[in-house]
Amino acid sequence: MLARPASIDFEALFGASPNPYVLLAPDLTIATMNEAYLATTMRERDDLIGRSIFEAFPSDPDSDSHQLLQNSFERVVRTGERDEIALIRYDIEQPSGGFEERYWSATHTPLLDVGKVAYILQHTVDVTELHRLRTFAAEAGHHAREESGVFQRANAVQEANQSLAEETQRLRAMFEQAPGFVAVLAGPDQRFQLANAAYRRLVGGRDVIGKAISEALPEVVEQGFADLLDQVRTSREAYIGRGVSVMLEAESGGPLEERFLDFIYQPIGTENEEASGVFVQGHDVTEQRRAEDHQRLLINELNHRVKNTLSIVQALAMQSFNDRVEPAAARETFDARLNALSAAHNLLTMENWESAGLLETIETSVAATAGANAARVSICGPDILLAPQTAVSLAMAIHELCTNAIKYGALSNESGTVDVRCAASSAVDNLLDVAIEWTEEGGPAVSTPSRRGFGTRLIERGLSAELRSQVTLDFRETGLKCTILAKLPTVSE
């Protein structure tokens, strides 16, 4: 029994092999070759090293032979798997000039480094004479059965390989273009073998192929997903997640962002054995989840606003209809207050109930109450933004002030006027100091009323509570002056 040699000089073995070999980089640059390859191709080593295979051995890029050879190289680089060409015509330029018709059989073997193709080893066999013998036999009418059988089998293998390659390309295109994210992880270290475009977008375009999950996506390991993948692989039981929160880097090295995913981890492997890997498939449902959350928020907000509005209407009804007021007058007062409330709601609706301008709120309430007399009310000041409920309260207060002016004050005759001035200071602790002055002039002389009606109480109490403000009503002989000093929370545009 022969002893195994202590060491083997593979470089010498490569050089001494009678079979032609050439070593190519993934970009098809020639790295080295053995003597048999140089003899077969009639070239010198210095003429080939560092040149592209198609530069060293030119051919028409549109020819079938060029396309067949290029496609084979591309399959090896893309899949990391060996590829074979049973028969290809590829003419070789002779040293003396011109091209010689040659036929070849080729095997392209990938040499991998950390899961990626580092080199391609091409083993070529010159089958020109065998091809010519078959052609000669066919033309002469003889039956070169052995040679013919070889070529028939070669052609059949090549046709099968071509069909498989086309089918693989179609499946790969479908995988890449799938709307949901898809990935395949293999081995105990959960190393990525495949990941489609949707998956790459999900992880911020990071290069994950050939990397273990701990290297490619360290943030998901910290969140327990690597343990979950291990559990699926060892137990061979699929895991289904619905609306699962995952923190991912939107771009490599960027901050973590929350995404919500529907997904399945499906074990890969034969029965009764530990799964060799895990198939990952799912959909990013973040926008759907946010839309559902927003819808719930809107429904809750709507319920809140409806309750507030009903409370306001109930208070208006209780104060408008009482034993001291004639039914017709009470009905008229109640309708006017509802119209003012409706105008405030319309204004907020146009702004999606997010905010309303101070001046616009006052102008809308005055217009809804005073009608043609609104032209006799001047309004000026900064148009700061009000929160929705604050705008409703202010609109109702302005309605009451305007109603009193029409009944008893400056708008009860033909010459009186109302001046509304607003001012605001800089925000402190997100609160604005706002002053609103309502000053009537030119109307009949007024005096302090003997009792407070609902409208006066609404101004003094309701508005004050809502706006955390101080309200002063000065019934001067020349006309009413109402001063509101309020602290309002700032509202972003």
Image (cartoon, rainbow, N blue to C red):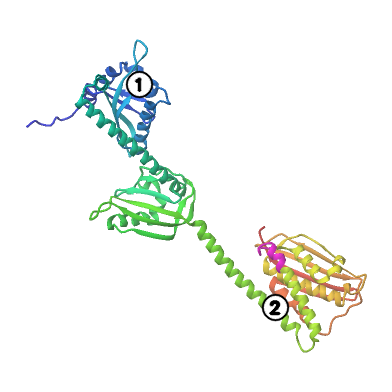
Viewer-proximal residue, 93 or 306? 93
The three-letter code of the residue at mark 1 reads: Ile
**SS class, disc 1:** loop
Q: Are marks 1 and 2 in contact (CB under 8 Å)?
A: no
Q: Is residue 203 magenta?
A: no
Q: Note whether 21 is above or below 480 in the view shown.
A: above
Q: Which residues are magenta?
A: 345-355
Position in image of residue 73 (x %, y %): 35, 31
Position in image of residue 273 (x %, y %): 23, 54
Q: Note whether 443 is above or below 229 in the view shown.
A: below
| Mark 1 vs mark 2, CA separation in Å | 91 Å
Residue 112 visible to the viewer? no
Q: Please give left or right for residue 188 compared with residue 358 in the image.
A: left
The three-letter code of the residue at mark 2 reads: Val
Q: Note whether 292 is above or below 135 in the view shown.
A: below
Viewer-proximal residue, 420 or 334? 334
The residue sitting at the bottom extreme is 323
In which quadrant is the N terminus drawn?
top left
**SS class, disc 2:** helix
Which residue in the protein does label 2 denote?
313
Crowding around mark 2 (Cα neighbors within 10 Å: few <14, some 14 to 19, many 20+) is some
The quarter holding residue 400 reads: bottom right
Viewer-proximal residue, 171 or 232? 171
Which residue in the protein does label 1 denote?
49
